[in-house]
Image (cartoon, helix red, strand yellow):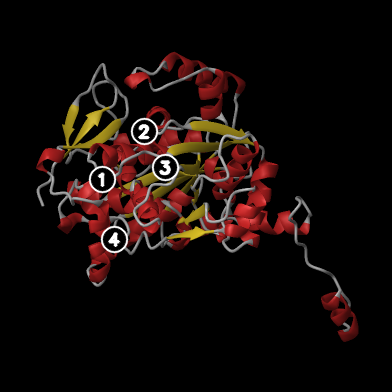
Amino acid sequence: MAITAYQKCINPDCGAEFDRTEAIFKCPKCGDLLDIQYDWSKAKLPEKMEDFSKRWANRNQRLDFSGVWRFRELLNFCEDEHKVTIGEGQTILQQNDFIAKELGMDKGNVHLQYEGLNPSGSFKDNGMTAAFSHASLVGAKSCACASTGNTSAAVSLYAHSCGMKCTVFIGQGRIAFGKLSQAMDYGAQTIQIAGDFDDCMKQVQDVCSKLNIYLLNSLNPFRLEGQKTIMYRIIESLNWQVPDWIIVPGGNLGNSSSFGKAFKELKDLGLIDRIPCLAIINACGADTLSYLVNQRGLKWNSGWVESKEINSLYADFTAKKFSPHTIASAIEISRPVNLKKCLRSIEICDGLVIDLPDEEIKDAKAMVGKYGLGCEPASAASVAGLRRLVQDGTIDPGEKVACVLTGHALKDPDLTVNYHTKREGVLSNPPVEVPNDLDKIIDIIKA
């Protein structure tokens, strides 16, 4: 299969192109973000999306078993010998009529894309299998990332499987123990910075630049190529039909950026006939995207983004020593690195962004748990967002919606236990205290 990929700066005033074998992650000429682009005229593509189904019959083959590399023609940036996989992408799209009823949606129209079934328990593995494949291509020996938790777990796991040295940067007291435990267990060197994720992100970029270490945050465009496949699997699970809405939490905005890119490519290639709407959900305590889009009117504008609006807001953050705060730690980010690419996705998908308080996110998390799938707090932002968008009439009960649940419930068990035992929400389910007496126990159960 001929390799047709190259890297290209997203800044229309620059547009510089670079070979796929360079590990640069930002445009060396202007400092803007890079995209992975393909010469589709030279690519060997299926005639229709359904053709990818044939690979289910070859699940003893490692690349066909992967829920990422099963679609490898659509992210063809390295030879098969470099492709890394540990079985990622074995996820499910669950139709959930219980939640549909709770939210006022029609039966059969609410689906939960459960990425918690990935090897490290989150969607990050979709990106890591792609990024580590590129790391193999360029011969990287050491890697690093900044993390609110899930990235560190995924990077540590894939680095271990590839025999690479791994360093993760975390903010002081800003990571759930369920995630931190994974990074330590998988053998990563963990460095705790006296600061938040944005501080860690700045430091890891400087460290990787000075020490020639492979960067694995979503600034890495090859990581986003892997995350496109979450959308392919949703379409696959809907019998190759496109839903009306995709709803996703907004943190560093890698997912939302990759989803828009995925749908544009599929539409341009004639593999889908329409593009779904995209809703991105911020927490109120980390609402950078929502503020810039809804209050400052920031748009993609064919790549000519009003950067002064972004720079002004970030300067204000610095002056006020602002640090984001939300119980949804995975999206507790105030300076999302993929902001511009996300604006592009909003344009491609006729999208929107809203922000919600922690209380609504916690209640949505409890609802997801009650009706069949546990998820981490940030994941529940997508379901909380669906509730709000149905209430305000943006989403019609008859539309088909896929909510992305980004991570497993055990990523942050402390929050779950506190929600229930401290009766923090309408769905709290605390333990019932009872004497060590059989009759009294039976009375409680029969009540």
Which residue is more in the foreground, 351 or 337? 351
Q: Which residue is mark 2?
A: 206
Disc 4/disc 1 C-alpha distance (Å): 26 Å
The quadrant in which residue 317 appears is: top right
Q: SS class of the residue under badge 2?
A: helix
Look at 54% across and 38% down and name the residue there. 281
Q: Which residue is mark 1?
A: 271
Which of the image's four quarters has the C terminus?
Answer: bottom right
* Residue 178 seen by the camera: yes
Q: Which residue is mark 3?
A: 255
Disc 2/disc 4 C-alpha distance (Å): 29 Å
Mark 4 and mark 1 lie on one chain; the one further toward the N terminus is: 4
Give the numbered dot on residue 85: 4
Disc 3/disc 4 C-alpha distance (Å): 20 Å
Which residue is more in the foreground, 261 or 166? 261
Look at 54% across and 49% down and name the residue there. 379
Q: Nearer the viewer, mark 2 or mark 4?
A: 4
Disc 2/disc 3 C-alpha distance (Å): 24 Å
Mark 2 and mark 3 lie on one chain; the one further toward the N terminus is: 2
Q: SS class of the residue under badge 4?
A: loop
Residue type at tag 2: Asp
Q: Are marks 3 and 1 in contact (CB under 8 Å)?
A: no
Q: Is residue 310 left or right of residue 362?
A: left
